[in-house]
């Protein structure tokens, strides 16, 4: 399987040439958050107070999500979501990129920057936007333009791209404030239960705050 939330987020965060639209470490935070959200929406984990707990240890069938689930199952002491983001992010990007290459969606390209520094990029295998990404973009746009219920995974993905400041890059022709307001409204109005809405909102807010802190730290250290 290669169509989890983290896979969709990854494709959205890369352009067709393999350049990143989301910087480090926001990209890794978003990927880890996507895996947590996938497990939550699949009914495998939940939040008890402010702690991540396992509600069903049955594998989902997605090797990436199941590896994360196994880690949470094996952890004897409950952790808050922010304590899981970095452990789950470790090596996650590489595993997701590898399986997109294996699926023929991306291709691995190696070159050198300024003819000296080695670089690996993951470009579209066809040279144009991957069909899987086109489908995801279409779903996101339909959610933004519609006024009916939005599928939970689409709503979660919209919240993630907003959290890492990717939404305005994906939809450059839309007013930034109106875009944010619409995504916030979707997050509030399209969940089956208040508990799920609160849990998802907490994880998305966490990603946004971690991203903001990392950006501020980078600015300070480079000034």
Image (cartoon, rainbow, N blue to C red):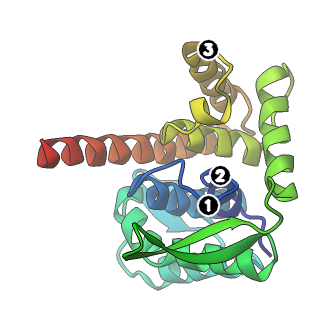
**Relative horizontal placement of residue 115, taking residue 61 as reference (left or right):** left
Q: How many marks?
A: 3
Element at label 2:
loop
Query: Residue visible at 78% across and 65% down?
Result: 3
Query: Residue visible at 83% across and 64% down?
Result: 126
Query: Which residue is identified by label 1?
Result: 18
| Residue 145 at x, y percent in the picture | 82, 21
Query: Which residue is identified by label 2?
Result: 15
Q: For the residues marked 2 and 3, what is the alpha-carbon distance in whole angstroms?
A: 22 Å
Query: Residue visible at 66% across and 20% down?
Result: 182
Q: Which mark is residue 175?
A: 3
| Residue 175 at x, y percent in the picture | 61, 14
Element at label 1:
loop
Dot 2 or dot 3: first in sequence order is 2
Are the two marked residues, 2 and 1, in contact with CB atoms closer than 8 angstroms?
A: yes
- Depth-wise, is mark 1 or mark 3 nearer the camera? 1
Element at label 3:
loop
Q: Which mark is residue 170?
A: none
């Amino acid at each position: 399987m290669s169509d989890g939330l983290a896979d969709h987020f990854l494709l959205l965060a890369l352009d067709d040439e393999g350049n990143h639209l989301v910087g480090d470490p926001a990209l890794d935070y978003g990927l880890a958050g996507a895996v947590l959200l996938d497990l939550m929406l699949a009914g495998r984990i939940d939040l008890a107070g402010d702690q991540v707990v396992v509600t069903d240890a049955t594998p989902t069938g997605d090797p990436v999500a199941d590896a994360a689930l196994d880690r949470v199952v094996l952890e004897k002491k409950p952790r808050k979501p922010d304590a899981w983001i970095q452990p789950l992010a470790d090596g996650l990007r590489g595993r997701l990129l590898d399986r997109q290459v294996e699926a023929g969606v991306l291709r691995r390209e190696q070159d050198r920057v300024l003819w000296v520094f080695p670089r690996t990029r993951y470009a579209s295998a066809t040279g144009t936007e991957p069909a899987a990404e086109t489908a995801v973009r279409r779903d996101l746009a339909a959610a933004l333009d519609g006024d009916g219920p939005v599928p939970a995974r689409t709503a979660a993905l919209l919240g993630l791209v907003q959290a890492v400041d990717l939404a305005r890059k994906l939809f450059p022709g839309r007013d930034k404030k109106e875009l944010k307001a619409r995504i916030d409204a979707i997050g509030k109005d399209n969940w089956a239960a208040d508990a799920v809405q609160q849990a998802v909102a907490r994880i998305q807010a966490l990603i946004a705050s971690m991203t903001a802190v990392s950006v501020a730290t980078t600015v300070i250290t480079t000034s």
